[in-house]
Amino acid sequence: MTIQAIKGTRDILPDEAERWQRVEEAARRVFRRYGFREIRTPIFESTELFTRVIGEGTDIVSKEMYTFTDRGERSLTLRPENTAPVVRAAIEHHLFQRPDCERLYYSGPMFRYERPQKGRMRQFSQIGVEAFGSDAPALDAEVMEMALSFLVALDIPDASLQINSVGCEACRNLYREKLREALADKVGELCSDCQRRYRENPLRILDCKVGCRRFLEGAPTLLDTLDEPCREHFQAVRQCLDRLEVAYRVDPMLVRGLDYYTRTTFEVLGASLGAQNALLGGGRYDGLVKSLGGPAVPGFGFASGVDRLVLSLPEETQEKRRGPDLFIATLGAAAWEPALLLARNLRRKDLWIEWEPAPGKSPKAQARRADRLGARHLLFLGEEELKRGIWTLKNMEEGSQKELRASDLDALVKELLR
Ligand code: HAM
């Protein structure tokens, strides 16, 4: 039996990888304008980092982590998200003292043992940002506006911003009580997970994946429960978004699946994805840095699912993919070395050169290969050409031919770039 990719993982083949590169390049371009710099953290971390930060009662920690014991008996976990690792790294390297490291972005694979379906993988990729050092509502609005600019740069149509506030710890404690009251006579009807959530943290019932949310219809919302400072903060975030002319919808049920959020939470939903329609999500986490032993530094960030962004990219316009600048075909053993040297010299001029390294292929077979690769030019190197010191360059797009002196590399380069 042949070995295949593990369920929930997939290979990104070259055609698709180019779409991934477009997404990554757009992220770098857009994030740089807002002062974000890249950070790269390890793929695995100590398990405790995630259990403490994401929360024991969350789906991620309770059933989705890839946790294993290494040969040194340490409990390690493949990162299911990257906010906790970035905060860990920022504390470890004292980045909060450096204004040039307050705004960080990352890109790379994350791992969650979820049920795979379109747009939901066990190994998936995120591009995310974390901005530290301010609890000002303008920061929330600025980063959400950036998230939307990123999607605009990718031409992803009809993305819609949903926002909410989950308040501070006090607001949430009060809300948990209200939820328990509202659900008191329906506990028996909840799914078994939600019966546990009811006892441990009824807030998590809001992101039940099997539909217990329906029991919350008519129940009070978090927004109704915010204290004055949190209410004002949310109001100010909304005003900033309005000033920035960013359209949004308030979704009072949006709590998100991680425990570290305070105040603003948000998601951007895509139009073309079906059930797994969150293109990105994030929010504010003012207590997180301190909870991991760092200074009392507030933060705001989001992560986007690259798999989902790639699925949402508009169909490529039928522009033909650019092929190699030149294919060098060789004829006879004597041509092999000059061909290799010519390829090297042209590649040093930043040109894309292909040739046939296997000896003895017929000119016809080589021309066919050049054609299949979409080469723009073809050059035959045979004994005759080497003796004369003259090369015949064929322009595959125009069907024309030109003779060039072998010693004049610049003329050849000029011709290839034409
Ligand atoms: P999250 O909502 O868990 O947030 O994930 C962010 C995005 O990652 C989702 O909106 C989705 O696009 C993508 N995603 C999540 N799970 C999967 C999956 N199994 N397959 C494919 N895509 C997936 C976080 O991870 C937070 N760390 C975001 C954040 C950063 N909050 C503050 N800063």
Image: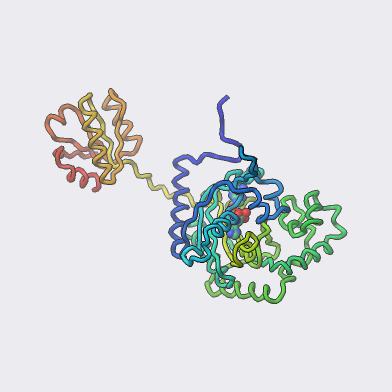
Q: Is residue 284 left or right of residue 361?
A: right
Q: Is residue 217 above or below residue 243?
A: above
Q: Residue at x 67, y 58 (%)?
A: 256
Q: Residue at x 61, y 75 (%)?
A: 236
**x then y, percent, for residue 202:** 77, 59
Furthest residue in direction front, as rendered: 72
Q: Residue at x 57, y 61 (%)?
A: 301
**x then y, percent, for residue 230:** 67, 73
Which quadrant would residue 348 be assigned to in this image?
top left
Q: Is residue 311 above or below residue 384?
A: below
**x then y, percent, for residue 2:** 55, 26
Q: Is residue 193 left or right of residue 276?
A: right
Furthest residue in direction left, as rendered: 388
Q: Is residue 107 left or right of residue 209?
A: left
Which quadrant would residue 251 be assigned to in this image?
bottom right
Q: Quadrant of the N terminus?
A: top right
Residue 270 visible (yes or no):
no
**x then y, percent, for residue 29:** 43, 59
Q: Residue at x 31, y 36 (%)?
A: 354
